[in-house]
Image: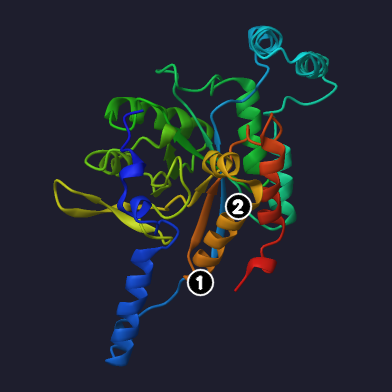
């Protein structure tokens, strides 16, 4: 996807991605300044914060008969899994007859979980159909408009999930921003689709259209601190050598990366690593930004892995320091 291969990241190769090293060095510097009695220039206003975010890449799983048929065909002819083929048929018919929700229609579930535990959820919608990798929904459809209104009415937030080809394209990005502004007048934050990010141009483009913060700097295959930080920080124009107004809120955990750990080792190992990161962020009074897609709850492998997210949102105190 045109991204830097994170396996070559220094923190991954040397096994310290789980440590917010930039914050640790900053805290060390602060202690040294305190010992030198430079207390008048030290301000510590940080507070541990949980920020649940949700990229809406796909609105519905059963968005057409062809989707069901492809899965049914693979179950029968590729995997020879007849019980799964029967299950797929039953699920499709139940959704078609409105007996059950589409497995990707988890908006109410996500918001109820956040509301019950006094969190605000941040939803990122795609306003582009320029690439084949973009969304399978029309941002201006009545269903999407109603869903966005419902999210905002319930006190949650909606941001822009920047299109696949728009992270380095001013014209496409501006068009998407204006489209989304029609639905969310107070639009102020973004995340790049597939986490595509070019440090030489993306920060400036996001800053110039007036966004206040972005949350794209994170790992796609691993979990941890890609930028070495769990604090928001200002992005930088490397050409003009100027600090930009827009801030970056580093992404700490993405659901697909957590699933990868569970698949290669175990659910318990994934859970242990996950809550170790929570402890590290809490220790630094940082922001724990987690990405859990609306599609990552009820399909195939997801129910067991999603329990980690539900436990995390429901109770953090058992893992507090």
Mark on residue 233? Answer: none
Residue, disc 1 = 283
* Secondary element type, mark 1: helix
From mark 2 to mark 1, how far is it between C-alphas? 21 Å
| Label pair 2/1, CB-CB below 8 angstroms | no
Q: Quadrant of residue 64?
A: top right
As drawn, 50 above or below 211: below
Q: Is residue 307 left or right of residue 221?
A: right
At horizontal 28% and vertical 88% (from top left) the residue drawn is 38
Quarter of the figure with the N terminus: top left
Mark 1 is surrounded, within 10 Å at the Cα level, by few (under 14), some (14 to 19) or many (20 or more) other residues, namely few
Quarter of the figure with the C terminus: bottom right
Q: Quadrant of residue 71?
A: top right
Residue, disc 2 = 269
* Secondary element type, mark 2: helix
Mark 2 is surrounded, within 10 Å at the Cα level, by few (under 14), some (14 to 19) or many (20 or more) other residues, namely some
Residue 297 image position (x, y, % from top left): 68, 36
């Amino acid at each position: 996807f045109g991204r830097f291969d994170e396996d070559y990241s220094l923190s991954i190769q040397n096994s310290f991605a789980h440590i917010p090293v930039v914050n640790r060095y900053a805290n060390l510097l602060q202690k040294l300044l305190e010992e030198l009695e430079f207390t008048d220039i030290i301000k510590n206003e940080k507070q541990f914060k949980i920020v649940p975010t949700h990229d809406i890449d796909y609105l519905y799983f059963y968005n057409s008969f062809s989707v069901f048929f492809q899965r049914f065909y693979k179950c029968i002819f590729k995997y020879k899994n007849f019980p799964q083929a029967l299950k797929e048929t039953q699920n499709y018919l139940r959704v078609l007859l409105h007996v059950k929700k589409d497995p990707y229609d988890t908006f109410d579930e996500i918001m109820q979980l956040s509301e019950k535990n006094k969190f605000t959820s941040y939803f990122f919608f795609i306003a582009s159909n320029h690439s084949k990798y973009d969304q399978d929904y029309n941002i201006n459809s009545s269903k999407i408009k109603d869903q966005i209104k419902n999210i905002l009415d319930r006190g949650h937030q909606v941001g822009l999930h920047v299109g696949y080809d728009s992270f380095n394209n001013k014209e496409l990005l501006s068009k998407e921003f204006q489209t989304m502004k029609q639905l969310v007048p107070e639009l102020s934050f973004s995340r790049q689709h597939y986490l595509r990010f070019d440090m030489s141009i993306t920060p400036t483009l996001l800053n110039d259209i007036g966004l206040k913060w972005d949350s794209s700097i994170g790992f796609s295959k691993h979990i941890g601190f890609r930028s070495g930080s769990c604090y928001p920080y200002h992005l930088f124009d490397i050409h003009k050598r100027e600090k930009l107004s827009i801030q970056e809120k580093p992404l700490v955990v993405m659901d697909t990366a957590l699933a990868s750990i569970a698949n290669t080792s175990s659910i318990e190992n994934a859970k242990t690593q996950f809550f170790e990161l929570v402890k590290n962020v809490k220790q630094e009074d940082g922001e724990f930004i987690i990405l859990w897609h609306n599609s990552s709850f009820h399909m195939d492998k997801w129910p067991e892995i999603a329990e980690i997210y539900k436990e995390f949102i429901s109770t953090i105190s058992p893992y507090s320091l």
